[in-house]
Image: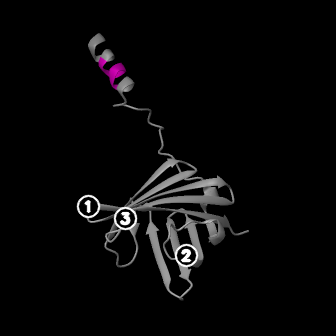
Amino acid sequence: MQILKLFFVGCIALGFLGPATSQPPKIDQAFFGFWNLDVAKSDFAGQPKPRSGQVNWGKHGWAFALVFANGDLFTDAVAIDDGCTYLGASPLQCTYEIVTPRHVRLTTKEGKKVTRVGDIELLSDDVTQTTHRVTPDDGPAYIEKTVWIKQK
């Protein structure tokens, strides 16, 4: 009986058996809502700068759009209900991690190659900053930093 008791104590200490109430961290609800890109405070590392951008965060994921000076539109959307899934016809795969409730990391892969790692952080309840480490196929790696302001 003593050996069995020591086994369970050891399993708990090593993390094999945790408390039944442990929950994974949840994203801070201050992320939820519509956000506008602050183009003037953002740095696109020499890449074409968008004229405007908007993202809508919700508990199931987000939808994102950028409009460029030449009228081009870039959009994507990610669902996070069951892992991380790009919506629509996309060759990309992703992982989504809640580093802390106010810091989310999105890793994008094309096949086995990581093409982008984005850290999105709430600086306050109405300002986020993203840092994207980008590894393109046709050029050197670069870092984008964007600032987003929450719509009131």
Determine whether, in the image, residue 92 is placed left or right of residue 40.
left
Determine whether, in the image, residue 16 is placed left or right of residue 56.
left
Query: In the rendered image, which quarter is residue 12 located in?
Result: top left
Q: Is residue 106 visible?
A: yes
Q: Of label 1 and label 3, which has the lower sequence position?
A: 1
Give, as a single range, the part of the protein colored magenta: 7-11
Say if 91 sits above or below 106 in the image: below
At horizontal 57% and vertical 85% (from top left) the residue drawn is: 69
**Which x, y percent locates residue 70?**
53, 88
Asked if the residue under mark 3 is in contact with the one under mark 2, i.e. CB atoms within 8 Å, the reply is no
Identify the disc placed on residue 140.
Answer: 3
Say if 71 sits above or below 1 in the image: below
Q: Amino acid at mark 3?
A: Pro
Queried whether the magenta region covers residue 8, the answer comes back as yes
Say which of 133 and 11 sits in front.
133
Between the C-alphas of marks 1 and 3, the distance is 18 Å
Say which of 121 and 69 sits in front.
69
Between the C-alphas of marks 2 and 1, the distance is 28 Å
